[in-house]
Amino acid sequence: MTRPVYETDALIADDIEAYLDQHQHKSMLRFITCGSVDDGKSTLIGRLLYDSKMIFEDQLAALENDSRRVGTQGQDIDFALLVDGLAAEREQGITIDVAYRFFATEKRKFIVADCPGHEQYTRNMVTGASTADLAVILIDARKGVLPQTRRHSYLCHLLGIRNILLAVNKMDLVDYDQTIFDSIVQDYAAFAASIGIDAFTPIPISGYKGDNITAASPHMPWYQGQPLIEYLETVAIDNDTDQARPFRLPVQWVNRPNLDFRGFAGQIASGSVKPGDMVRVLPSGKTSTVTRLVTFDGDLDEAVAGQSVTLCLSDEIDCSRGNVIAAADSPPQAADQFEAHLVWMADEPLIPGRAYWLKLGTQIVSATVQQPKYQVNITTMEHLAAKTLDLNAIGVAVVTTDRQLVFESYAQNRTLGGFILIDKMSNATVAAGMLNFSLRRAENIHWQAIDISREAHARQKGQEPKLLWFTGLSGSGKSTIANLVEKKLHALGKHSFLLDGDNVRHGLNKDLGFTDADRIENIRRIGEVAKLMTDAGLIVLTAFISPFRAERELVRAMLPEGEFVEIFVDTPLEVAETRDVKGLYKKARAGALKNFTGIDSPYESPEAPDIRIDTTQTTAEAAAELIVERILGIWSPDL
C-alpha cells in the first residue's frame, strides 16, 4: 500500500496570518452520520478525514498498523478505525458512543458526529443530533431501507434537522447498479413523506473505495449530481434563518466587574440586536433600551444569532440568569404547562408525577410529567398507549413546571424549545424533550388575588403554620405518634389537623393504587392539600410511608422555608414486621400483596431529617413530647 504524500497549504508558508484569517472566516457546518448497523458511517467519516488531509504522519502509520491487526479490510486501510476509538468498538466492529471529529476544506469547516446504529444506543444518537445542521443518513445498497434507518430519520426530523443527505453506500458491492439506487431512493421517499420530510438529497457512494466522495465517480456516469464533499461545502446552513427571526438572548451571567458597569451576557439564540433597540426582559415583562454590545474584542455595532455578547441596558431593571432578553415588540411566550415530545434516556423508566429538574437554555425549574398521551412506534409510526416510557422510547406527554418558563416551540427555536430532564437525586440526565406548544389552560387560569393573607390567618390563630411530615415503614408507629402529637397540640389550644395515609385513601385518593407512579401522585395530592391547610394557618400532621426522597422534597419545596418538618420514625424492617398489626407483611411475604414497601418496593430513608425518632429506644409518648417541644419551642411538665 502506497502512503500518500500530504502537501502543506502554500499559504501557511507564505503568510501564516493570512492563512489563519482565511480559516477563521470560513463557515462551520455541524453534521451527523446515522443509519443502521454496518451501513458504513465510521468508514465514511474516516474517508472524509483521509481525503481532506486531516491525518498526521504518526496517525497514518498507526492507522496502517491497526488496519492490519484489527481491521476488517484485509491489508487495506480500515478507515472506520479513525473514528471507532473504544476498545469495545474495535473488538465488535460497531460504534457505541458518539465520536466527534473536526476537519476542514478550502471552503468550509466541519464538525461531524459519528452516531451509533444500534437501537440500544438511540440516546447517544439523540445527543449527537441535538446540535447538528445536517444529517447524512447512510443506507447499505445491499439491504435497502431498514427499521433503524426509519428510526434515525424520524429522530432527525423530530430534532429539527431540515437538511437530509441520503447516502446510498457500498455501491461497489452491487456493481454500481443504478436500478438498485433508484429503488432505494423511491422507498425512502415514500417513508420520508409519511413523517414530514419534504426534501432530501440522494447520493450514491462507496465510502471504502472513495466513489463520489470528493470527486465524481467514473463507475457511476449515470449520476449527474454533486459529490458528497461538494454538497457539504455548499449546502445552505440555517444560520441565516435564525438571524431573520425575532431577537432572543437567554441570560447566562450578569457581568458586574465594578460599580460602573452592569451587563447581561449570553449567546444570541435568534435575531439580531443593535444599540438603540427596545428590548423586553421576560418573564417580568420590563422594557428597556440597548446602550452597548460589549465583547472581549470591543463594542459591536450589531450582533446576530450565534454570537456571544454582553448587553448593557439604559435602565436598572431586574434581570438575572435564566431570564430572556427579547425584542420588545415580539416577545416569546411564558407558560407553566406544555405538550412535549420526550426521548427517554435513562435505564429507570419515567415515573409520572415525579418531580425532575427541567433545564431549558439557562432556565432551571422543577417539572413533573403526566402519564404519556402515547408512545411512538418508530417502525410503523403508530401511536401506542403507554403508562410510562422506557429506555430509548419516544412519546408525547404533558409537562408541568412549578413556575413560568419562557419558551418557543422547538420548531421555531431549538434553543428556547429544547430541554433536558434531570433526576433530582442522582443528577443524571434522564430525557431530552422538545416543546410543542403551551396548553390553553396555562394561559386562561390565573391566580386570584385574596385580601386575607396566610400571615393574617396565622396571626388570628396565634401560631406559626407547620407541616409535620411523619415518614417511615408500615408498622413503624407513625400514625400512633402523630395522633399523640395532635392530642397534645389540641390540649395547648393549637389549631391542627391530622391527615392519615389510610384515611385519605378512603376518599381523596381512593382511585390510586400502590405502584410507584400512584404512590407519587398520592403524595403530590397530599402535599397540595397540606399546603392549603397551612395557608389557613393550621399545624398539619401527615402520617404516610412516602417512600421516595424526591417526593418528600417536592412537598418541602411547596412551602415557605422552615414550615416543612420531616420527622423520620426510624424503625428497622424486622421490628416493624414483628408488629404487623394489619397483617400486611405476612401477605407481602406470601406474594399476596404486591408493591409493598420494604418487601418488593423500596423505601428511601431521609438522609438529614429535621427530627429522628428511634422507636427501639423511645416510647410513642416520649416521642410525642419531644416533637411538640421542638415544634413549639416550649416545655412544661404537662407535656
Image (cartoon, grey):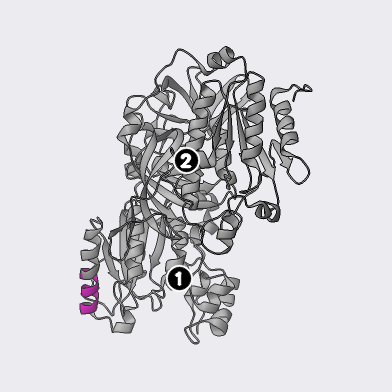
For image coordinates 45% across by 67% down, the residue present is 120
Is 203 located above or below residue 287 in the figure? below
Residue type, numbered disc 2: Ala
Residue type, numbered disc 1: Ser
In this view, the residue in front, 301 or 81, is: 81
Reading the image, the residue beneath label 1 is: 42
Is 219 located above or below residue 455 in the figure? below
> Residue 509: within the magenta?
no
> On the picture, is 329 further left or further right than 627?
left
User: Which of the image's four quarters has the C terminus?
Assistant: top right
Q: Is residue 121 visible?
A: yes
Reading the image, the residue beneath label 2 is: 367
Point out the residue furthest to the bottom here.
74
Residue 156 x, y percent position in the rendering: 35, 57
Task: Tell me which numbered mark, 2 or 1, is placed earlier along the sequence.
Answer: 1
Callout 2 crowding tier (Cα within 10 Å): few <14, some 14–19, many ≥20: many
| Helix, strand or loop at mark 1 | helix
| Helix, strand or loop at mark 2 | strand
Residue 504 x, y percent position in the rendering: 49, 38
Q: Is residue 364 visible?
A: no
In this view, the residue in front, 575 or 7, is: 575
Which image quarter: residue 478? top right
In this view, the residue in front, 336 or 283, is: 336
> Mostly what secondary structure, the magenta segment?
helix
Residue stretch in magenta: 179-186
Residue 413 x, y percent position in the rendering: 36, 42
In this view, the residue in front, 68 or 299, is: 68
Is 60 located above or below residue 106 in the figure? below
Q: Are marks 2 and 1 in contact (CB under 8 Å)?
A: no
